[in-house]
């Protein structure tokens, strides 16, 4: 849980990404999360990844580690990322089942941004 709180209090990549080629805005039903994921993808590789919005601790931490992990990887790497891997990047915190949506919101947003192939919010 310490790492989750660290990424919540000092999130990586929480900023605008004006060069983004793939943008997706999502809202979470549970916490009212308001999240925008912005990816810069060239030749199938994620060159930059950022996020903005007002989100709970779990969504903020997940967006932080996901955007950091994704930089320099093929966009298709999102297909292999799953809940267990995302939790592992956060040092495997024990989360109640109700917070699963919060954890997966950034991953879902990034996947949709790539699937839509451009700037969609």
Image: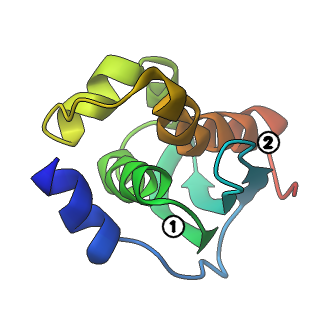
The 10 Å Cα crowd at callout 2, few under 14, some 14 to 19, many 20 or more, is few
Q: Are marks 1 and 2 in contact (CB under 8 Å)?
A: no
Q: Which mark is drawn over residue 50?
A: 1
Q: Work out whether residue 39 or residue 29 is closer to the camera in this orientation and state it.
A: 29
97 above or below 45? Answer: above
Specify whether residue 1 is in view: yes
Q: Position of residue 118 (x, y in %)?
A: 81, 51
Mark whose residue sits in front, 1 or 2: 1
115 above or below 68? Answer: above
Q: Please report the residue visible at 27 percent of the width from the left and 64 percent of the height from the top.
A: 7
Specify whether residue 11 is in view: no
The 10 Å Cα crowd at callout 1, few under 14, some 14 to 19, many 20 or more, is many
Q: Please report the residue visible at 66 percent of the width from the left and 68 percent of the height from the top.
A: 20
What residue is disc 2 on? 117
Q: Please report the residue visible at 45 percent of the width from the left and 54 percent of the height from the top.
A: 63
First reached walking from the N terminus: tag 1 or tag 2: 1
Q: Work out whether residue 104 or residue 70 is closer to the camera in this orientation and state it.
A: 104
Q: Please report the residue visible at 54 percent of the width from the left and 41 percent of the height from the top.
A: 102
Q: Position of residue 119 (x, y in %)?
A: 83, 58
Left or right? Give the position of 79 relative to 96.
Answer: right
The quarter holding residue 9 reads: bottom left
Q: Position of residue 44 (x, y in %)?
A: 56, 40
In the rendered image, which quarter contains the C terminus?
A: bottom right
């Amino acid at each position: 849980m310490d790492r989750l709180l660290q990424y919540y209090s000092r999130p990586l990549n929480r900023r605008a990404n004006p060069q983004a080629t793939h943008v997706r805005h999502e809202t979470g039903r549970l916490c009212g999360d308001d999240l925008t994921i912005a990816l810069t993808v060239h030749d199938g590789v994620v060159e930059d990844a950022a996020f903005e919005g007002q989100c709970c601790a779990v969504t903020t931490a997940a967006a932080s580690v996901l955007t950091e992990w994704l930089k320099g990887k093929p966009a298709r790497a999102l297909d292999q990322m799953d809940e267990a891997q995302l939790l592992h990047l956060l040092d495997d915190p024990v989360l109640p089942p109700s917070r699963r949506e919060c954890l997966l919101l950034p991953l879902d947003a990034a996947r949709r941004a790539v699937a839509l192939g451009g700037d969609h919010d």
